[in-house]
Amino acid sequence: MNKTDALIIGAGPTGLFTAHQLKLIGLDCEVVDNLDKIGGQCIELYPDKPIYDIPAVPECTGEQLTNNLINQLKPFDIKFHLGERVEEVKKEDTNWSVKTSSGNIFLTPNVIIAGGVGSFEPRKFAPKECEQYENKSLFYSVKDKNIFKGKTVSIFGGGDSALDWAIELSKDCKINLIHRRDEFRGAPATVDKMQELVKSGKINLFTKYQMANAHGDQKLESIDIKHDNNEIKNLKSDYVLGFFGLIMQLGPIANWGLNLNKKTIEVDTEKFETNQKGIYAVGDICSYPGKLKLILSGFHEGALAARACFKLARPNEKYRFEFTTTSSNLLKRLGKKE
Amino acid sequence: MAKIIYITHENEKHIIEVQNGLTVMEGAVQNNIPGIDADCGGGMACATCHVYVKEDWFNKLPKKENGEDDMLDMAFEPKKNSRLSCQIIVSDEIDGLEVNIPSKQA
């Protein structure tokens, strides 16, 4: 059981700056994220893409922004729980009890949902037949590459994950690489390496094909792939790997009794509180009249939600507004001597 | 203004007058056409506003920008006539455009 003043769900830019604001005003917080790394959409969707509309930062990539936010948290001690998804939330007296997929339980008066558009989950193959082989002979990530040794592996996708694994596994597996078009979006050097392996017969390349069907009893035996011109090929396969990136799913949050508007959570614009007292939503996941899905809006929303948390976390104290330029309290928390 | 014809997977036809300058995605979202999620809000970063453009229209539209095909790699059941509707800007020239919405976005 972890007791904390506020639990932040989501370690994207909004969640990170919200943590900063909570710590700055003297509250504790912990952060949970489904991804195995900090940064949210910035790291998952556009680590290398420049962003031009962060105030006072003329240009930075998603990765740079994330690193700067992590640096800004350095003075503080904040526990991150990565690779964990929040599953349940229950009211317990004046607290919320929040349970994660790894069985961690948090007891807190304040839950701040900074979840982007939900948690990231792998995009899956379209044909229904694929489902029954999932996590047995069909995977969307590689946990133990040794299981593929000496086997025939069919890999789908055109990005770096698909190419990297095709190259790596071609050392001791028979590899089919299947992609929906001739162009690959992976790094040029990786694409060249893959083409070399195709030439030397280490990788069988099928472009303009997509997954059409999967066959086998308990174990996967073969797959059908379909060309743009509808021609179907059957490939013997022991294993299938699909790398189509990640998709955002609202997941269990949808069942928390919050007022939803499509995939977003309705909040007020004073505290960014939902219809449940002590549960807030900030960043891309919240909606209110005039909402802009900009990172800077998330920062503003997090700053206000953090102040709202103070009241529930310290019911007998009064929150006083202070500036970091002048307050010795704040400077002390930031680890500056003055 | 241009008429955009959205056809859902269930074959329901929605004919919407969309203002010039908006995207085909925005036209759908603002009018609650089911089946277009647009998670990223039009940033070509999610592939959940994927549509199939009727063949004769496909070649008339301005060509895909860099990056759109990369994103379409991740779409659910992409085809040759796949586009991201957030990248199709509405103008008088595309009056009557027909797009089919896939069975799902992910």
Image: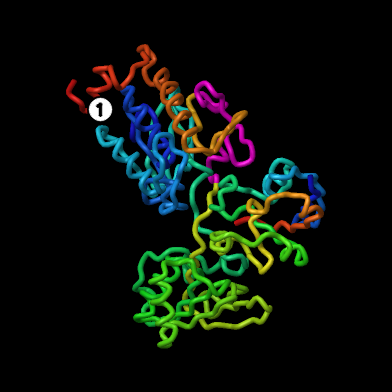
- Where's residue A46, x and y in %? 45, 52
Left or right, residue A77 beside residue B29: left
- Where's residue A158, x and y in %? 50, 69
- Where's residue A36, x and y in %? 37, 51
The residue lying furthest to the left in this view is A337
Residue located at (50% from left, 36% from top)? A283
Residue bearing mark 1: A334
Q: Which residues are magenta?
A: A250-277
Q: How is the image coloured?
A: rainbow
Give residue A309's quadrant in the image.
Answer: top left
> Which quadrant is the C terminus of chain A positioned in?
top left
What secondary structure is found at the residue carrying circle 1?
loop
Residue A258 visible in the current orientation: no
Amino acid marked by disc 1 = Leu
User: In this picture, is B22 found above or below A258?
Assistant: below
Residue A214 colored magenta?
no
- Prevailing SS of the magenta stretch: loop
The residue lying furthest to the bottom in this view is A200
Give residue A21's quadrant in the image.
Answer: top left
User: In this picture, is B86 found above or below A140?
Assistant: above
> Which quadrant is the N terminus of chain A positioned in?
top left
Residue situated in front as seen by the camera: A246 or A328:
A328
Left or right, residue A238 beside residue A75: right
Residue A259 visible in the current orientation: yes
Residue located at (63% from left, 65% from top)? B78
Instruction: Kindly identify which chain the residue marked by label 1 belongs to.
Output: A
